[in-house]
Image (cartoon, helix red, strand yellow):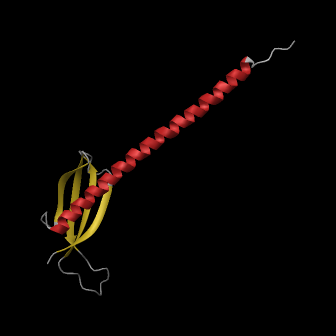
Amino acid sequence: MRQRGFTLMEVLVAVVVLAVALGALIRAGSQNASTAAYLQERTLAHWTADNALAQLRAGLVPLTEGTRQDEAEMAGRRYDLRIAVAPARSPHEMLPDPQGLYEVTVEVRPRDADIEETPLARLTGFVGVR
């Protein structure tokens, strides 16, 4: 009479396969969560840069040539801003430079990040002054 069932070797192989599969699923889930957090941070930083540019366009913040540091908060997170304002230049030497138009670049970094660190967001736009 022959016994039916699994041998110890078959059970061990099944457990190893299951462990490898679960490990891969856990790693994929962890990477997905990490990517989602990174994308959320980049999105909030971009919105912060967009808000800073909109405030300049609306005249809520004075438009002065040069580079200045500022800070902002978005969704409970604090960011350091670097805002560079320079007169806009014509794209071609045969055309005159536009008068009263400024090129504004806003860089957003996490609070207390090194200034040499790559910004989370960099937005360039134009602001006209009459």
How far across and down, in percent of the image, does residue 84 sit?
21, 63
Question: Which residue is at the far bottom?
Answer: 94
**Image height check: is 28 above or below 50?**
above
Question: In this rendering, does residue 118 appear at all?
Answer: no
Question: In this rendering, does residue 10 appear at all?
Answer: yes
How far across and down, in percent of the image, does residue 123 sit?
30, 62
Q: Quadrant of residue 124?
A: bottom left
How far across and down, in percent of the image, does residue 67 sit?
18, 61
Question: Which residue is at the far top?
Answer: 1
**Image height check: is 60 above or below 9?**
below
- Looking at the rendering, in which quadrant would you find the C terminus? bottom left
Q: Residue at x 27, y 80 (%)?
A: 90
Q: Quadrant of residue 53?
A: bottom left
**Image height check: is 125 above or below 91?**
above
How far across and down, in percent of the image, does residue 36 sit?
41, 46
- Looking at the rendering, in which quadrant would you find the N terminus? top right
Q: Residue at x 18, y 65 (%)?
A: 56
Question: Which residue is at the far right?
Answer: 1
Front residue of 20/111: it is 20
Q: Residue at x 47, y 38 (%)?
A: 30
Left or right: where does residue 1 sit relative to residue 47?
right
Q: Residue at x 17, y 67 (%)?
A: 58
Q: Quadrant of residue 86?
A: bottom left
Total labels: the figure holds 0
